[in-house]
Image: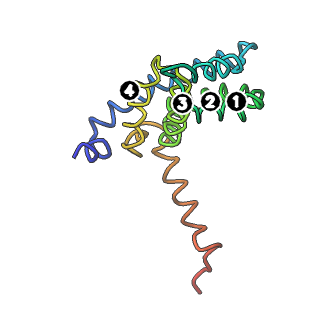
């Protein structure tokens, strides 16, 4: 019942638009600060998260610390590029209502990465609102560019179903 309300109700559409824009503004501004600040380095954050995986009650699970230590930290340059760009693009997508569900899903991935790294802050609240946006699907972006983008993409994919162009009727 709540699922249907999120997906179809005009009131939900307006509420989700406000939530989407507020979340988007947060993501976009944080990403922009990192992109233009010239000094973003995720290495210290990753090292701190790895350190939180020890002790009697670790805040970071061992498997996540292993991922950070074995993959993320050696490739910190890649993450220094992806994190700010991802935050900025997620924010723009949410604000404009463009590929809203995908933007919210990618936001959740980043929020969970921060949570897995032992940083609660606003991440848990953001994930909760992002779940509502993902569950709402197209209704969350109806007041936005998804009103035109999603039908265009559906038409584009339908044209190419079956591995190629459909033959014209004679």
**For the residue carrying disc 4, how many other residues have a C-alpha within 10 Å: few (<14), some (14-19), or many (20+)?**
some
View extreme (bottom): residue: 170
**For the residue carrying disc 2, how many other residues have a C-alpha within 10 Å: few (<14), some (14-19), or many (20+)?**
many
Q: How many marks?
A: 4
Can you say whether 122 is above or below 63 in the image?
A: above
Q: Which mark is residue 122?
A: none
View extreme (left): residue: 1
The residue that disc 2 covers is 65
Residue 110: give x, y in percent of width and height: 56, 31
The image quadrant of residue 135 is top left
Which dot, 1 or 4, sits closer to the camera?
Answer: 1
Q: Which mark is residue 69?
A: 1
Q: Are marks 4 and 3 in contact (CB under 8 Å)?
A: no
Q: Secondary structure at mark 2?
A: helix
Q: Nearer the viewer, residue 83 or 63?
A: 63
Q: Which mark is residue 18?
A: 4
Which dot, 4 or 3, sits closer to the camera?
Answer: 3
Q: Which mark is residue 61?
A: 3
């Amino acid at each position: 019942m709540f699922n249907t309300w999120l997906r179809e109700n005009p009131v939900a559409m307006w509420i989700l638009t406000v939530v989407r824009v507020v979340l988007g503004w947060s993501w976009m501004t944080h990403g922009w600060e990192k992109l233009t600040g010239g000094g973003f380095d995720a290495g210290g954050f990753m090292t701190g998260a790895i350190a939180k995986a020890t002790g009697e009650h670790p805040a970071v699970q061992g498997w996540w610390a292993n991922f950070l230590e074995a993959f993320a930290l050696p490739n910190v340059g890649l993450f220094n590029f992806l994190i700010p760009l991802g935050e900025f693009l997620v924010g723009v997508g949410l604000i404009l209502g463009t590929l809203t569900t995908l933007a919210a899903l990618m936001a959740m991935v980043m929020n969970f990465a921060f949570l897995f790294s032992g940083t609660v802050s606003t991440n848990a609240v953001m994930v909760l609102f992002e779940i509502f946006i993902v569950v709402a699907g197209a209704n969350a972006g109806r007041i936005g560019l998804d009103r035109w983008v999603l039908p265009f993409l559906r038409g584009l994919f339908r044209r190419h179903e079956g591995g190629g162009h459909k033959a014209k009727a004679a």
